[in-house]
Image (tube, helix red, strand yellow):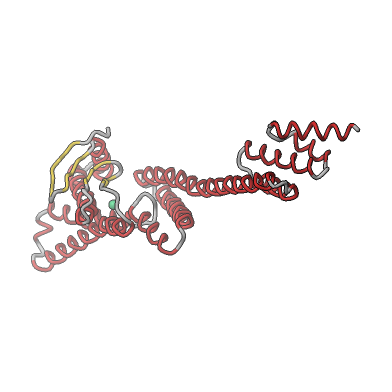
Amino acid sequence: MNKLIHLFTLNGIPVAVTPWFFCLMAILAMLVGNGSFLHGIMFAVVGTISIGIHEFGHATVANHYGLNPQVILGGLGGLTQHRSANAKQSFWITLWGPLSDLILAALSFGIIMLLSMLAPTFLPEHAYMQLFLTYMLWINFVWGVFNLLPIYPMDGGKLCAAILAKFFKPGLALKIGCVISAICCLGLAGWAVAEKQIFMIFIAFYMLIINFAGMKTAFAKREDTIKEQAGLQAEIMYEKGLVAAREHRWEDLEKYGHQMKACAETKDQRKRAYEFLTIACTNTFKYEDALEYSKHASQTDAVKQAVARCKNILKT
Ligand SMILES: [Zn+2]
């Protein structure tokens, strides 16, 4: 289903289509046509043109930046692939998709208005033309506005993320963007269910899955960073502890042992922290504590010697 069929190259931008796109258009034509062949076909034709113009809006800007874009009609509409762009380039590439739709909608509206003023009988006499222009106006208007909703992975979601990144730190911007996106997506799903818009229900729930997965990663990432930092902190304490042990500063060693235990992230780090505590307590004559700590420590020669010493002293 994901096999690409090359259609043509326009202005140096190759345009390809996936077989799935034809299936999607056929389903939409049947849903919208609702028995009328003319309406169904016209919707599919105008829909394809609109999606193409939308993607060409993205691709033309990407081409302007020299990012070798390629337009693919597929998925739930279309997509434009290009070499990686910086934040500013991404913003303009993204914005020009929905903007192209809105310009096309405005143009169609202008033509309809002009014709109805200059030749009032032309459109009523040419039903195909009237239907074509009406669909051009509405599909582009709806597709443009819909794409600007701040829902990921739509253009509006990407633009919202880009704007948030200007005002907040990256981690926080990502989280705020995810929450806004998920809330809007829930709203869209609710509206689609209430209005019984079958196709929109399908799209909204598909995006809900993407959004909740995104939210999970956005919030999990932070935990990972904290964990990483804690693990790193434990290693710093370990280094300090090694120096303290070499210099026989046993109180310091005990202090680093406790600190390392508190921020240890791995089993190994915890075991090494207990090793410090065992050795430190043995050397500060807290033999019972040392024996208690030794139970959780890595069984190194130093720990074994400390335990033997504690047991010997406690026996006598
Ligand atoms: Zn787009």
| Residue 85 position in % (x across, y down) | 29, 53
Tell me the residue at 27%/34% (across/down): 2
Which residue is the extreme one toward the right? Answer: 316
Q: How many marks?
A: 0
| Residue 261 position in % (x across, y down) | 68, 44
Tell me the residue at 28%/42% (across/down): 31
Which residue is the extreme one toward the front? Answer: 247
Q: Is residue 217 left or right of residue 249?
A: left
* Nearer-the-camera pick, 70 or 154: 70
**205 is higher (above) or lower (below) than 306:** below
| Residue 231 position in % (x across, y down) | 58, 45
Tell me the residue at 17%/56% (across/down): 133
Quarter placement of the N terminus:
top left
Which residue is the extreme one toward the bottom? Answer: 117
| Residue 163 position in % (x across, y down) | 38, 61
Quarter placement of the C terminus:
top right
* Nearer-the-camera pick, 296 or 141: 296
Q: Is residue 218 left or right of residue 206?
A: right
**296 is higher (above) or lower (below) than 176:** above
Choose top left, top right, bottom left or bottom right for residue 273. top right
